[in-house]
Image (spheres, rainbow, N blue to C red):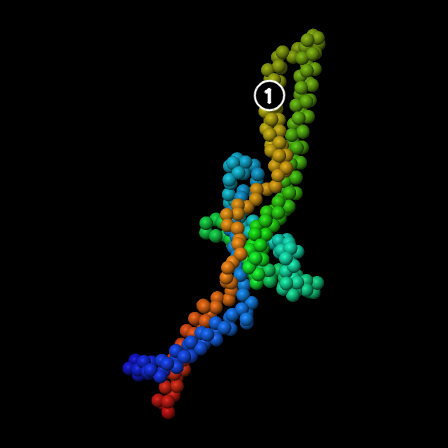
Amino acid sequence: MNPKELYWLMNGKFIKWMIIGMVAVFVFTFILTSSIMIKPLYRSEAIIYVPLTLFSHQYEQQGIGFASDAEIDGHIQMLKSTQLLDSLNAIYGLADAYGIDTSRPGGLQNLYHRISDRTNIQKTRYGSVSISVRDEDAQIAADMANDIVRLGDVIKNNLLMGNRLEAYRFAKEVYESKLAEIDAMEQRLAAAILSEQEGSESFSARMPRERVNFESELWELTERRNRYEMMRKSLEMDLPSSYLVTPAIQAGKPSWPPRLLFASAAALAFVLIFVFVEMIRRDVRRTT
């Protein structure tokens, strides 16, 4: 079509009906996406930094250690685990709220999908983890986001407790084994010294070597005892909790649906369709 033939775009009557239609579509879409037609969703977000998992590493860094990328990814998987989803369902009765019968085939999977659809957990470019929740109740959205943070620490502590106990038992076993060896060496040294004093055996030639061996074993015993004591003390406390830098708070306005965006997009779509239809109509009229 020749650009000169588009003069009708400036026609007052055409512009008038286009504006009327655009406003009507905008208002209609704005009303259609209101709380009367669609239940709004409120969004709350909590931001955390994941700490170092091992207490010994936290101790070395004076309790301010931050997790590596691998540990952050592992913590995110725990936050997305079915254990955590089950806990949220138990606390907030989400199956009843969503009208899902978990006893039916596929019901539990449907519940997990519904909860996951309302939550968004991801690592940010600053190394933190964003935990956002959308819900029809603004306070519940905030509470759920904060509970996900808390439950993630509980799940991690429970999952790793078994390994921590095994490590503690191993440290205790190697310490007690070395302690028994030291006791046996002490008894042999005492018996040898007593025999030499009684004149039954000469021990003087072997004394320096035996003393060096004994002192070396004492150093090894001290190291094992320190590791054992560290493990024993660490079991008396939970793993380091997440650094909650931004707790979730109740949102003041809904985040879904974006009414203004939808209404503006609908109005723009109407203008494009209106112009296109007019172009087709005029082409048809000209050819006939």
Q: Is residue 263 above or below residue 2?
A: above
Outermost residue toward the left in this view: 4
If the image is split into quadrants, where does the N terminus sit? bottom left
Residue 106 appearing in the image: no
Q: Residues within 10 Å of mark 1 (few under 14, many from 20)?
A: few
Q: Residue at x 30, y 82 (%)?
A: 7
Amino acid beneath label 1: Glu
User: Which residue occupies the extreme bottom position in the image?
Assistant: 288
Number of numbered callouts drawn: 1
Percent across and percent down for residue 151 are 60, 50
Above or below, 191 relative to 15? above
Q: Nearer the viewer, residue 117 or 218?
A: 117
Residue at image position (62%, 18%) is 210
Image quadrant where one finds the C terminus? bottom left
Please tell me which residue is depicted at 51% across the width and 63% down the height of the picture. 254
Identify whether 156 is placed above or below 224.
Answer: below
Residue position marked by numbered label 1 in the rendering: 215
Report which quarter residue 135 is drawn in: bottom right
- Find residue 238 and report its horizontal and vertical position in percent: 61, 41
Residue 183 in the image: above or below residue 80: above
Q: Is residue 95 left or right of residue 21?
A: right
Determine the secondary structure under disc 1.
Answer: helix
Tell me if residue 202 can be seen: yes
Q: Nearer the viewer, residue 246 or 115?
A: 246
